[in-house]
Amino acid sequence: MGRDVPALVFTREDRRRYRIKMQECLDAFAQMLRDSRFDADRPQVGLEIELNLTDTEAEPTMRSGEVLDAIADPAWDTELGRFNLEINIPPRRLIAGGPDAWEEEIRAALNHADERARTIGVHLIMIGILPTLRESDVGPKALSENARYQLINEQVFAARGEDLLIEVDGVDRLRTYADTITPEAACTSTQFHLQVSPEEFADYWNAAQAIAGVQVALAANSPFLFGKELAHETRIPLFEQATDTRPQEIKAQGVRPRVWFGERWITSVFDLFEENLRYFPALLPLCEDQDPTQTLERGDTPELSELTLHNGTIYRWNRPVYAVAQGMPHLRVENRVLPAGPTVADTLANGAFYYGLTRALVDEDRPVWSRMSFSAAEDNLHAAARHGIDARLYWPGTGEVPVPELVLRRLLPLAHQGLERSGMDAAWREPLLGIIEQRCVTARNGAVWQKEMLHRFEASDRCGRHEALRRMTRQYIDYMHLNAPVHTWPVD
């Protein structure tokens, strides 16, 4: 979303005007693509990290407003829940500043925010789902005060006409109902942005879709929800269900969900924005005064506000982004599949793998998406969410193989090639991708550590589930601040 909206009641006239404006925006966007009016000379990367807030006992705390006041930095913003915050790291060139510059910038921002939060008794934690979160923590009072989230909540339930059913299976089984979208706030993610030219957008988006399952398997970090041990990356099924506007009858008719992997490889970025209008009714029909056609005719750049707002209410795992910076429009792929954490070191390793692998796949003579069905890529995502680094995934030329084998033999060398072609030398590549390599060698990621640590506390200390989760979370926070990659974290 990334945009404040007023509290409103929408009328049929609002929706009619919005539909017209979205079509006008789409037509203007098509004209801009034909005219090549996009900034692609100095492509940049970007990063967003969502975090949870806990008290000194590692329990969730609903104090996002107070923490934002304490941090006093415009890079930080509210998220859906009062126990969440988000930081936007400024965009940069991938290889700018040397091998340690990005890590130092991110750690400095997070450490400053954590120091300020601790002055009021709050801690920040980068994790896919906060393990100590109870079902009672995600009621209506946990919804952010920001009006845009209140409106989204109202519109989702107006469309559904009934409570949300949430079902996730794993070691345990969760089945519950929610009367707000606040369970979505349990899902905290890392989002990598990659600026690309219109001509290359389809290839990069297809590549990102093809590797989404591999990314999730390697970086799974969300095995617990409401005290239950579920999928290794429970964020994926939870997010797919927590903003679903479809009652069961509409699902049975094949209507697309708003949290969506997609249904086909694309040939142009236009395909995705066109699908948005064709398949999804507006949740927030807010019209701006700018006429996109007239703006283009004057030689100026339209904001396409209605098109971008609508795009922000459709939660693709790889989302297209249109934005205007310093008067120039650009396009980005927003990679949304990964959980937050566990450390900045792990985060940057995940980013290096993603940026390098997509570059290498785009450069291949015979693209992977020409040799792999779209449904296979989607199946990989859900298998990875369920089984994490223990998953077996399909890849062309190898069939269905264990994730560590696939990455070590096929994908990690490609990631090295992609980063090298992007101008990153071996002294920078090796430490970053070495973290991915060691995750595969040890078969350990955040989800594995959390599960093992929980079981240790339950067995050795003979404490109940919630107390074991609380102790594990406190240990997680301590290790997170050491910034040692998660595959090195001890279980003792």
Image: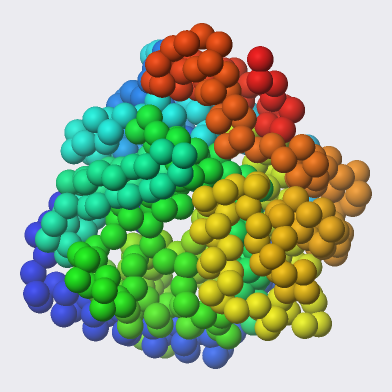
Give the quarter of the figure containing the C terminus: top right
Horizontal side of 423 relative to 389 (left or right) equals right
Looking at the image, is 134 positioned above or below residue 174? above
Nearest the eye: 90 or 488? 488
Q: Nearer the viewer, residue 131 or 145?
A: 131
Residue 443 x/y as whole percent: 72, 40
Relative to 484, say whether 347 is above or below. below
Residue 466: image x %, image y %? 39, 20
Residue drawn at point x = 69 percent, y = 37 percent: 444
Quick check: 299 left or right of 366? left
Residue lying farthest to the top in this orientation = 461
Q: Identify which residue is drawn at 45% across, 35% down.
A: 229
The answer to whether residue 340 is above or below residue 249 is above
Q: To which quarter of the image does residue 304 belong?
A: bottom left
Q: Residue 116: image x %, image y %?
A: 47, 19
Residue found at x 17% / y 52%:
163
The answer to whether one can see residue 439 in this image is yes
The residue that appears at 77% across and 37% down in the rendered structure is 442
Q: Nearer the viewer, residue 250 or 79?
A: 250
**Residue 230 quadrant:** top left
Model colouring = rainbow
- Residue 391 image offset from top left, x and y in percent: 63, 52
Front residue of this view, candidates 370 and 309: 370
Q: How many marks?
A: 0
Task: Give the quarter of the image for residue 188.
Answer: top left
The answer to whether residue 428 of the structure is visible from this angle is no
Q: Quadrant of the N terminus?
A: bottom left
